[in-house]
Amino acid sequence: METVGAHLPPSPELPFRWRGDRGKLAPAWAAYLTGSLKQAGYSDVRFIDAMTNDLSDEQLAALIAAERPDIVGATSITPSIYNAERALLQSRSTCESRLK
């Protein structure tokens, strides 16, 4: 079973204090999520750092679609909450037959 986790940049809809580098946080959650998934038997785990690689919503959606994952996880810290929601909704529509 393939899983994909994504680290997303701050959402542009948020107040100024979260924009730019102020809302960029290291993806510490990735190690916890990846470790837990691997411990549970998921060996094919892919991490996409959309923030560091400055990926657009469309680029991220294309990468996720190409992976054809069974599970998609995304950050939901305050600065990226709306981007996380968009990414998960896009993942659902892109991989609809695989994600429930």
Image: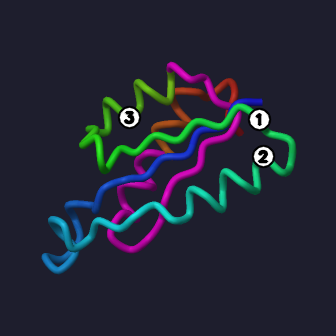
Residue that numbered label 2 is attached to: 38
Q: Nearer the viewer, mark 2 or mark 3?
A: 2
Residue that numbered label 1 is attached to: 43
> Is 33 on the left or on the right of 1, as rendered?
left
Q: CA distance from mark 3 to mark 1?
A: 22 Å
Report the front residue among 26 and 72: 26
The location of residue 85, given as percent across then percent down, is: 45, 55
Look at the image and give the residue range highlighted in magenta: 66-87
Above or below — where is 97 with respect to 34?
above
The kind of residue on which mark 3 rests is: Leu
Residue that numbered label 3 is attached to: 60
Residue 72 located within the stretch drawn in magenta:
yes
Q: Earlier in the sequence, mark 1 or mark 2?
A: 2
- Check disc 2 and report its element: helix, strand or loop: helix
The kind of residue on which mark 1 rests is: Ser
Residue that appears at 44% across and 45% down: 87
Q: Earlier in the sequence, mark 2 or mark 3?
A: 2
Q: Nearer the viewer, mark 3 or mark 1?
A: 1
The location of residue 52, given as percent across then percent down, is: 30, 48
